Image (spheres, grey):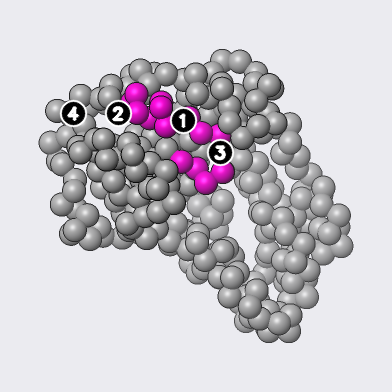
C-alpha cells in the first residue's frame, strides 16, 4: 500500500503504525518513512497517546487493520481524514471516509483488498498480484553477520524448511517435511530448518537424526533471520510470516495451503517473482473445525521438489 501511494504521491510522508515485532519487516521498505510503535503507545495514558499522534500531524489515517481503540484515538488526535471500512460500527462513529469492502467471500488476495482502502485517493487501486510485487520497495536489506554468512554454500541451492506455524496456519506435517528433505539430493542442496526455540524442542529428534540438516531454530532475531533468508535461495513453509518475507525478497518460495476459505491461497498466497503455492484441488470442509487438515497433508513432497530449481 505504501508503494502504491508513493507511486502517485512521491513527495508524501508515510508513517506505519504497528506492533514492535513488525518493525524489522517494515524497515526493509523504502516507501515507509517512519515507524510508530503501537506497543509504546499502549503503555501511555489516553492523553499522552493523543499528544503523540498530534505531534505526527498526519493529514490522513487509513485503518488497514481495524481496531476500535485506534479508530477512537485517530479521531481524538484531530486527524483530518480518517479512512476505514463501512462494515465496522465504530468506523461509522470515528471515520469520515467509509469504504465498502467485504473480505469474507471475496476472491481477491488480501493485498488487493487492502488496496481498495485507497480508493478515496482517486487512483487506480485495481492491481494484479503480479503487479503487487513491484510495490514492496524492499531495498533496505540489513547485512548478514559473518557467523551466518559462513553457513551459506555458494555451490549449492540453500533451502530453508520452516515446518511450524505457531498456530497461524494449517501445517503440512513434519512427516512431509522429512520426505521432502530425503527427496533432495544432498550434493545439490544445503538444507536449513528454521523456527522458534519452542519449535526446536518439537523437532529435536529429527534434527539429531540428520547431521547434514542445519538447525537454525531460535538462534537469530528477526532482523538477522530476514538477512539470512535474503542470503539463501529458497524457502518452503505453510502460510507464515517467513513465507511472505521470502517471496517479497525475490526468493524461490513455496507455500503450502489448505483448500478452505478464508485461508486458501487465492487470499493468502505468497507474492513474489519466484513465489509458488500448492493446494489440493478440492473444497475442504471436513477439516474446518480441527487444528489439522488432511487435505494439506496430502500434498506430496515430489510436488515441492518439482518447483525447486538447482544450482
What x and y, as percent, mark residue 135?
Answer: 47, 47
* Mark 2–mark 1 distance (CA, rounded to whole Å): 13 Å
The numbered mark, 4 or 3, whose residue comes first in the sequence reads: 3
Residue at screen point 26% across, 47% down: 231
Q: Distance between the residues labelled 4 and 1?
A: 22 Å
* Residue at x-position 33% and y-position 58%: 220
Which tag, 4 or 2, sits closer to the chain's start? 2
Instruction: Write down the residue under mark 2.
Output: 181
Res. 169 mark: 3
Q: In which quarter of the image is residue 107?
A: top right
Q: Classify mark 1: helix, strand or loop.
A: loop
Asked if the stretch drawn in magenta spans residue 155, the answer is no
Residue 110 seen in the figure: yes
- Judging from the image, what secondary structure is the residue with disc 3 in? loop
Q: Name the residue under label 4.
A: 186
Mark closer to the chain start, 4 or 1: 1
| Residue 60 in the image: above or below residue 228 | below
**Mark 1 lies on residue:** 173
Q: Is residue 163 above or below residue 5?
A: above
Q: Could you give the CA–CA distance between mark 3 and mark 2, rounded to whole angstroms?
A: 21 Å
Quarter occupied by residue 65 = bottom right
State the quadrant of the C terminus: top left
Q: Is residue 139 left or right of residue 260?
A: left
- SS label for mark 2: helix
Pinpoint residue 258: horizontal percent, then vertical percent.
Answer: 57, 27
Query: Can residue 266 be seen here?
Result: no
Q: How far apart are marks 1 and 3 (CA)?
A: 11 Å
Look at the numbered discs 1 and 3 and tell me whether their residues touch, using CB distance below 8 Å.
Answer: no
Give the spatial CA distance, label 4 vs label 2: 9 Å
Amino acid at each position: 500500500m505504501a508503494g502504491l501511494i508513493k507511486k502517485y504521491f512521491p513527495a508524501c510522508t508515510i508513517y506505519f503504525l504497528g506492533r514492535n515485532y513488525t518493525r524489522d519487516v517494515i524497515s526493509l521498505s523504502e516507501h515507509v518513512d517512519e515507524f510508530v510503535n503501537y506497543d509504546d503507545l499502549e503503555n501511555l495514558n489516553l492523553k499522552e497517546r493523543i499528544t503523540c499522534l498530534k505531534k505526527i500531524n498526519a493529514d490522513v489515517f487509513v485503518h488497514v487493520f481495524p481496531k476500535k481503540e485506534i479508530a477512537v484515538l485517530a479521531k481524538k488526535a484531530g486527524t483530518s481524514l480518517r479512512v476505514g471500512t463501512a462494515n465496522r460500527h465504530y468506523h461509522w462513529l470515528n471515520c469520515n471516509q467509509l469504504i465498502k469492502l467485504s473480505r469474507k467471500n471475496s476472491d481477491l488476495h488480501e493485498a488487493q483488498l487492502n488496496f481498495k482502502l485507497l480508493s478515496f485517493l482517486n487512483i487506480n487501486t485495481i492491481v494484479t498480484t503480479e503487479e503487487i510485487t513491484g510495490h514492496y520497495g524492499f531495498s533496505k536489506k540489513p547485512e548478514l553477520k559473518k557467523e551466518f554468512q559462513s553457513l551459506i554454500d555458494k555451490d549449492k541451492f540453500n533451502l530453508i524448511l520452516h515446518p511450524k506455524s505457531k498456530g497461524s496456519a494449517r501445517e503440512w506435517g513434519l512427516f512431509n517435511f522429512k520426505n521432502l528433505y530425503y527427496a533432495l539430493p544432498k550434493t545439490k542442496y544445503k538444507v536449513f530448518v528454521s523456527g522458534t526455540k519452542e519449535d526446536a524442542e518439537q523437532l529435536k529428534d529429527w534434527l539429531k537424526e540428520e547431521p547434514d540438516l542445519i538447525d537454525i531454530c531460535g538462534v537469530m532475531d528477526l532482523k538477522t533471520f530476514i538477512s539470512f533468508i535474503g542470503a539463501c535461495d529458497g524457502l518452503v513453509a505453510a502460510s507464515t510470516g517467513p513465507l511472505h518475507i521470502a517471496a517479497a525478497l525475490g526468493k524461490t518460495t513455496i507455500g503450502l495451503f489448505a483448500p478452505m476459505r478464508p485461508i486458501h491461497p487465492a487470499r493468502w498466497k505468497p507474492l513474489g517473482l519466484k513465489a509458488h503455492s500448492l493446494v489440493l484441488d478440492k473444497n475442504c470442509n471436513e477439516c474446518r473445525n480441527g487444528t489439522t487438515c488432511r487435505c494439506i497433508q496430502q500434498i506430496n513432497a515430489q510436488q515441492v521438489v518439482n518447483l525447486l530449481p538447482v544450482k
